[in-house]
Amino acid sequence: DDALAALAAATRELENHRAGLERMRENAAGLEDEIVARAYAASPSPGWLAVPVGSSAMHLRHPLALVSACGYPEFTNYVGGFAGSLDYIWCDSSALASVASMPMPPLESVTAETALPNSEFPSDHLPMVADLRFVH
């Protein structure tokens, strides 16, 4: 009976702790939104904003209509333990349009020697190439 009572008390404490953490998360998110909104309103460059969040993150806002000139490939980086897209050529679709882009190599050539870099691709990042034209 003592063990069950101790378990029930510990479970209640854990639930209270989780509820407290959730309240803190909600409060922090609300404060963060408020800080970003105030900074955006006070920005000297309309439409542009960069607000640091901690020591290694940042909220960014801009008025550009960015699109990837090379589309959204499955991967641009393929190394042991990771395969994903890290590289893009971003362009403002209100000013530039992608006319053509170099196709990505097939997975077989990227993985022929396990991963990148290899004898065909000297970097762990695949090249991105796009031809752009001005919209106006």
Image (cartoon, grey):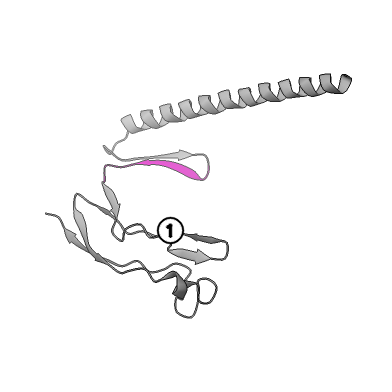
Residue 101, image x, y percentages: 28, 66
Using a 10 Å C-alpha cutoff, classify the residue at mark 1 as few (fewer than 14 neighbours), some (14 to 19) or many (20 or more).
some
**Residue appearing at x 32%, y 69% in the figure:** 103
Q: For the residue labelled by badge 1, is the local secondary structure a helix, a strand or a loop?
A: loop
Q: Is residue 13 magenta?
A: no
Nearest the camera: 101 or 32? 101
Residue 96, image x, y percentages: 20, 56
In the picture, the quarter occupied by the C terminus is bottom left
Tell me the kind of residue under disc 1.
Ser
Q: How many marks?
A: 1
The magenta stretch is 55-64
In the image, residue 66 above or below residue 4: below
Disc 1 target residue: 85
Q: Is residue 61 magenta?
A: yes
Q: Quadrant of residue 36?
A: top left
Q: Quadrant of residue 40?
A: top left
Residue 94, image x, y percentages: 19, 49
Tell me, yes or no, if residue 42 can be seen here: no
**Residue appearing at x 36%, y 68% in the figure:** 104
Residue 88, image x, y percentages: 36, 58
Q: Can you name the residue that lies furthest to the left here? A: 136
In the image, residue 111 above or below residue 28: below
Nearest the camera: 93 or 60? 93
In the picture, the quarter occupied by the N terminus is top right
**Residue appearing at x 73%, y 24% in the figure:** 11
Q: Is residue 79 left or right of residue 65?
A: right
Q: Can you name the residue that lies furthest to the right here? A: 2
Tell me, yes or no, if residue 60 can be seen here: yes
